Image (cartoon, grey):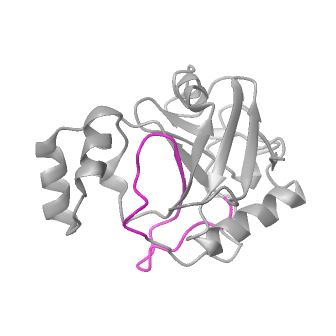
Amino acid sequence: METDKCIRVKITTDSGVIILKLYDSTPLHRDNFVKLVKEGFYDSLLFHRVIPQFMIQGGDPLSKNATPGTLLGGGGADMPRIPAEFNSNYFHKKGVIAAARDNNPAKASSACQFYLVEGKVSTDAELNQIEQYYGIKYTPEQRKIYTTIGGTPILDQNYTVFGEVEKGIEVIGKITNVPRDSHDRPLADVRMKIEIAE
């Protein structure tokens, strides 16, 4: 189990504040994220892709000065990928932070882009299909969370989960429901500021 020694970060948006705990068991992702946060990398970047009952994605460095309607998501490709750190204890329940990535065989993560899960409630039948298709096995506790609180199980063991929301989970829902264009970019910019939480 994670301890209270975990590093926490604060994401500030116009829709509210989110406090995240970063897992110690995904040290490559934790350390990379903390390094970028301390450098101020994320300040004024956008949540450029928001999908109701799914997730909000941000961290594209090209989003800082992007004009309205510009298609985003390709920024940071010149930065070294982070090797995948899959852990069966960490799954895509509502409120986790995970690393976005391009399509690569090793499922290595983007060095800078991330998403926060809103998701939706799943049925046991849906979870059975995911288990069979991806060859994974959910614990009774994980099933209970997916069938009561929700998440995006279809992403499990495909994208690295490296932390979870401790406060402000409702902010994710506020952001997923803003008006957006055909590329799921909010019509009004949703900017972030990220800092280490004291």
Range covered by the magenta-colored residues: 87-112
Q: Quadrant of residue 124?
A: top left
Picture coordinates of residue 89, whole percent (x, y):
40, 63
Picture coordinates of residue 40, whole percent (x, y):
88, 54
Q: Does residue 102 belong to the magenta stretch?
A: yes
Q: Does residue 138 belong to the magenta stretch?
A: no
Looking at the image, which residue is at 52% across and 22% down?
Answer: 177
Q: Residue furthest right?
A: 39
| Between 160 and 74, the one nearer to me in the picture | 160
| Between 72 and 191, the one nearer to me in the picture | 191
Horizontal side of 81 relative to 16 (left or right) equals left
Looking at the image, which residue is at 61% across and 43% down?
Answer: 71
Looking at the image, which residue is at 50% across and 75% down?
Answer: 84
Task: Give the overall secondary structure of the magenta segment.
Answer: loop
Picture coordinates of residue 147, whole percent (x, y):
25, 37
Looking at the image, which residue is at 64% across and 75% down?
Answer: 28
Q: Quadrant of residue 39?
A: bottom right
Picture coordinates of residue 117, whole percent (x, y):
48, 42
Q: Quadrant of residue 80?
A: bottom right
Horizontal side of 149 relative to 192 (left or right) equals left
| Between 126 and 46, the one nearer to me in the picture | 126
Horizontal side of 118 relative to 196 (left or right) equals left
